[in-house]
Amino acid sequence: MSFRIVQGDVLARLGEMADNSVQCVVTSPPYWGLRDYGVAGQIGLEPAPAAYLAKMVAVFREVRRVLHKDGTCWVNMGDSYNGQSPRVASIQENGDLSYRAGGRAINIRGLKPKDLIGMPWRLAFALQEDGWWLRQDIIWSKPNPMPESVTDRCTKAHEYLFLLTKSATYYYDQDAIRTPFAEKTKALSFETMDFGRRYGYREPTRVAGWAAGSGSHAAKDHAVAKSHKGSKFREGKRAKGNESTAQRFDNAKGANKRSVWEIATEPYTEAHFASFPTKLVEPCILAGTKPGDVVLDPFSGAGTTGLVAVRLGRRYAGIELNPEYVAMSERRLRADRPLFAPPVEAGNPPPPAQMELSCPPQDGVEMGGGEIVAGDGLTGLGTNFAP
């Protein structure tokens, strides 16, 4: 598949893109007050939250313009504390990135020292106010969080991932990111559920194998349900037809993915320290796109979104201010290309629950000769990258 990363100011580069030219956006913008990347024009070191939010709203207003009407936008955002000093980043001669404490501590009028700023929710509400649909907050739970030398609060082990959309209805492949039912869940389903509650249980309409209706179980069960109300449902007292219902439950594709994702951070020696893990990006792309669709990251950074997008048979467009990070992304994506396997046969994609990021593209989408262009324009992207 094709991929392109361009260097430049995010607002200027977005302005070069065509309306409705991308299907999905997955990004982790610079967090406010946490990092100094040493590049003129960087976002994140504004003197006050209001200035940062104004810049972010302007960026995502352009993102909304280039996003398809049925597209999705996934935004990862971390938080910081009042009085915290940003860390200064620098790339060494060998290409590795190091950082040190430095810069002036950020103090916000109206907040007390050590106050949590709450920037993820400030941003989410600002984008909602600007016209985005704020569909969900997802908790990225880190089993291997960064150690903190604090004694008066818990170690921070989570960040937020917001799902935003351009309209009330949008493309979302629920089946692509389902999780297998736990054995305990299946064991405690219809075989052990209180029969009185079974009578009133409403069938979900989007789980494969269920009858797509909105009512409760058949009225013929009503008399039996009343006679067994308050008791456990036992073998031998099962109403006719209920066994097949339990069997259909067992054969469903899996459970709807929950809103807490436990994903470990991933080391990457060259990547800047704000790089998010591939496993965090994967479900966003699987749920928000089909093979061949265009995925955008306006804050491309180490190119993680692009790496996942191309591995999954999608096309990628990235924007990055720092030319050193553009070069870093180029090395990373080019080094990963030998790992691509031949495409699977059309109509036989790997099961989503078992799909690894090293899997070939789905549905026979062929991996073409991708290109990474530093400094090339994105004019005509909607035509060049159209599915």
Image: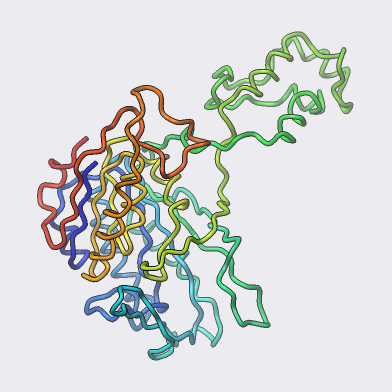
Residue 344, image x, y percentages: 36, 28
Q: Along the horizontal axis of the image, is 277 left or right of 297?
A: right
Residue 314, image x, y percentages: 30, 41
Against 112, is 287 above or below?
A: above
In this view, the residue in front, 98 or 136, is 98
In this view, the residue in front, 77 or 278, is 278
In this view, the residue in front, 279 or 200, is 279
Q: Along the horizontal axis of the image, is 232 left or right of 291?
A: right
The C terminus, quarter of image: top left
Residue at figure coordinates x 43%, y 53% from the top left: 278
Residue at figure coordinates x 84%, y 19% from the top left: 226
Against 54, is 160 above or below?
A: above
Residue 224 image-quadrant placement: top right
In this view, the residue in front, 288 or 278, is 278
The N terminus, quarter of image: top left
Residue 382, image x, y percentages: 16, 43
Against 46, is 23 above or below?
A: above
Residue 289 image-quadrant placement: top left
The number of discs equals: 0
Against 95, is 189 above or below?
A: above
Residue at figure coordinates x 28%, y 81% from the top left: 38
Residue 156, image x, y percentages: 59, 70
Residue at figure coordinates x 75%, y 21% from the top left: 199
Q: How is the image coloured?
A: rainbow
Residue 212 image-quadrant placement: top right
